[in-house]
Amino acid sequence: MQSFQIVLTALAIPAVTAFAPSTTKGSSTTTTLNAGKTYMNGWSPEDSTTKFCYGLPGSVDPFKDFDPFGFVERADLVQMKAYRESETTHGRVAMLAFLGLIITEQPFSFHPLFDTAGKDIGPAIRHLDEVRASTPFFFELLAVAIGAAEFARSIRGWESPGNAELDILKEGYYPGDVGFDPFGLKPDNFEEFSVMSTKELNNGRLAMLGVAGIVAQELIDGKEIFVHLGLAPDTFDPTSLPVTF
C-alpha cells in the first residue's frame, strides 16, 4: 500500500505542476496584448476577458472552458503559455507511455529493444527491473537522449532564467511547437492548426488519465492490464525477475 501511495503521488506531481500557479510574476501583472502582432502558427492572443485561454485551442464540448479551480482566470499571458507548454508536453509523454504499456505486455509482448527469450516479464511497471539486469547501460543512454531533447526544447522556446522581463517562454514561441514535423502534417493556417492542436491535446489528456489508471491497477494486483481484463493468459512468474516484491 505504501508503494501504491508513493507512485500515485509521483503521478500527480506532473499534473499539479502543469497547472499550479507560478511563484514568479510574468512581464505584466495586468496582461497587455500586442494587438496586431501575430504569434507562431497564426495565433494572436486575445483579451482573456472575452476569450478563454487567450484564444488558445483546446476548449471543447461538453466541458467547454473547463477550469474548475480558476487557474486560467488568474493567469496572465506569460503564465498561460507556460501552462499550455506543460500540458502539451505531459500529454505527448503520456501518449508514448500508453503505447509502451500496451504493446510490451501480454498478449503482444513486443520488445523491440530487448530480447526476452519468449519469457513473460509481467506488468510494464516491472519491466525496468529486467532492463537493468540485462542491459544496464540503457539507462545512461536514456538519460543522455532525454537530456538532449529537453536541452533542444529549452533552447528553442524558453527564455534564459532571471531575464529582465521574467518571461518563461520566448515571446514568439508557440507553446509546444518544438519544430518536429517529419511528415509535414502541420497546417499553414491557424484555423486548421487549431483543430489539429485540439485533437492532440484531447488525446494527450486521455492518455494521462489512461496511464495513471493502468499503473494504479497493476500496482494493486500485479497483473498485466489485458490479463486483469481476462483477455490474455496469465503466464507471468514474479520470481523470474531479478527484483522480487
Image (cartoon, rainbow, N blue to C red):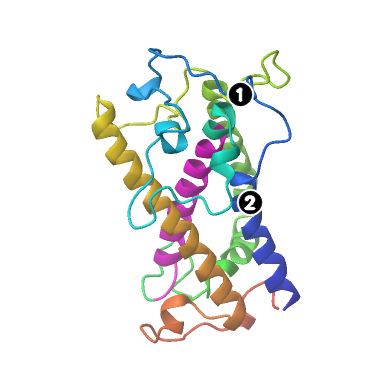
Magenta region: 82-106
* Residue plotted at (56% across, 23% down): 31
Task: Give the side of residue 212 with respect to residue 174, left or right.
Answer: right
Disc number for residue 16 = 2
Reading the image, the residue beneath label 1 is 30
Q: Is residue 72 magenta?
A: no
Q: Quadrant of residue 80?
A: top right
92 relative position to 184: left or right? right
Whether pointer 2 and pointer 1 mark residues with C-beta atoms closer than 8 Å, the reply is: no
Q: Is residue 96 magenta?
A: yes
Type of amino acid under label 1: Thr
Please state which of the two labelled residues, at mark 2 or mark 1, is closer to the viewer: 1
Please identify the quarter of the rendering in which residue 102 is found.
Answer: bottom left
Which residue is the extreme one toward the front? 49
Q: Main secondary structure of the magenta part?
A: helix
Residue 127 visible in image: yes
Q: Secondary structure at mark 1?
A: loop
* Viewport quadrant of the C terminus: bottom right
Classify mark 2: helix, strand or loop. helix
96 or 173, which is in the foreground? 173
Residue depicted at x 25% and y 31%: 191
| In the depicted structure, whether residue 166 falls above or below residue 12 | above
**Residue 104 sits in which quadrant?**
bottom left
